[in-house]
Image: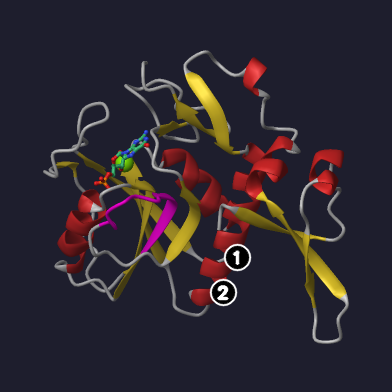
Amino acid sequence: MNLFRQLSLHEKLSEDIMGSKLQFLTDEFGNRTGVVVPIEEWQKSQPSSPSSADLHPDLVRVIVGADEIHQRVQTLAAQISSDYAGVGRLYLVGILKGAFIFLADLARELSIPHIVDFMALSSYGKTTTSGAVRILMDLREPIEGQHVLIVEDILDTGHTLSYLYRNLKDRNPASIRTCILTSKRRPNPPADVPIDYLGFEIPDVWVVGYGLDFADRHRTLPYIAEIKKTV
Ligand code: 5GP
Ligand code: MG
């Protein structure tokens, strides 16, 4: 998803992009229907991605720009709305704190009935993982018979989601799916959890912004950025 980006032919391509290697998509008659550009080139063309000179000194680079997030959230919401059409009410479970911005944007784009609740799980300190997960704040209501969608910010080892998924599944919801904003391309694949909706695959680095933090900092940046290892 993230190495290349597919653009419609109507999107304005910057000179940077035009100068890079373009791969056109064609329909069955050979008409050009789209163009695939390297994501790095595309990101450079995004007005909402500050150039590295304008970034906070803690940050290395923008990984997903605000416009790209916004578009992807709309696409995910449309997909979810269509998948759950006619099902009744969707029970969104946002995982605090990281998913609150994603959930807020996603929920407001849904065209189906839904309610919002939150859970808080223990997260490991700073950038290391212990694999142990604990519920700090639980849902207010039982979810038995509900159509549950877990909304989470990021998948790294997958331990958090795997624990949560099993925990909520044991409460006998009518259905349970996951919607994850970002997933890291790691050397070891994440624990066995179904990812039903995914925003972006990102590199295996520590990221902040759009809900994601480092020691509670940089959480409300409009884009997702890599933070320096030395911070
Ligand atoms: P996992 O259990 O999949 O290893 O880790 C998931 C949790 O770790 C996420 O919910 C998030 O709290 C935290 N996490 C993992 N990687 C990152 C990252 O790059 N940035 C931030 N801010 N949190 C992360
Ligand atoms: Mg989290």
| Left or right for 154, reference 103 | left
Provide residue 180's location: percent of width, then percent of height: 41, 54
| Left or right for 218, reference 229 | right
Provide residue 161's location: percent of width, then percent of height: 26, 54
- Tag 1 and tag 2, C-beta contact below 8 Å: yes
- Quarter of the image with the N terminus in it: bottom right
Q: Which residues make up the magenta segment?
A: 178-190
Looking at the image, which residue is at 58% across and 52% down?
A: 3
Provide residue 201's location: percent of width, then percent of height: 47, 52
Nearest the viewer among 119 and 155 is: 155
Q: Residues within 10 Å of mark 1 (few under 14, many from 20)?
A: some
| Left or right for 139, reference 23 | left
- Above or below, 29 against 96 in this view is below
Nearest the viewer among 121 and 131 is: 131
Snapshot quadrant of residue 163: bottom left
What residue did someone put label 2 on?
A: 82
The image shows a total of numbered marks equal to 2
What residue did someone put label 1 on?
A: 78
| Left or right for 207, reference 167 | right
Question: Can residue 140 be spotted in the picture?
Answer: no
- Any magenta on residue 50? no
Tell me the SS state at disc 2: helix
Q: Residue furthest bottom?
A: 28
- Above or below, 136 against 162 in this view is above
Q: CA distance from mark 1 to mark 2?
A: 6 Å
Provide residue 34's location: percent of width, then percent of height: 79, 66
Nearest the viewer among 163 and 43 is: 43
**Amino acid type for the residue under numbered disc 1:** Ala
- Any magenta on residue 180? yes
Mark 2 CB in 8 Å range of ligand 2?
no
- Quarter of the image with the C terminus in it: top left
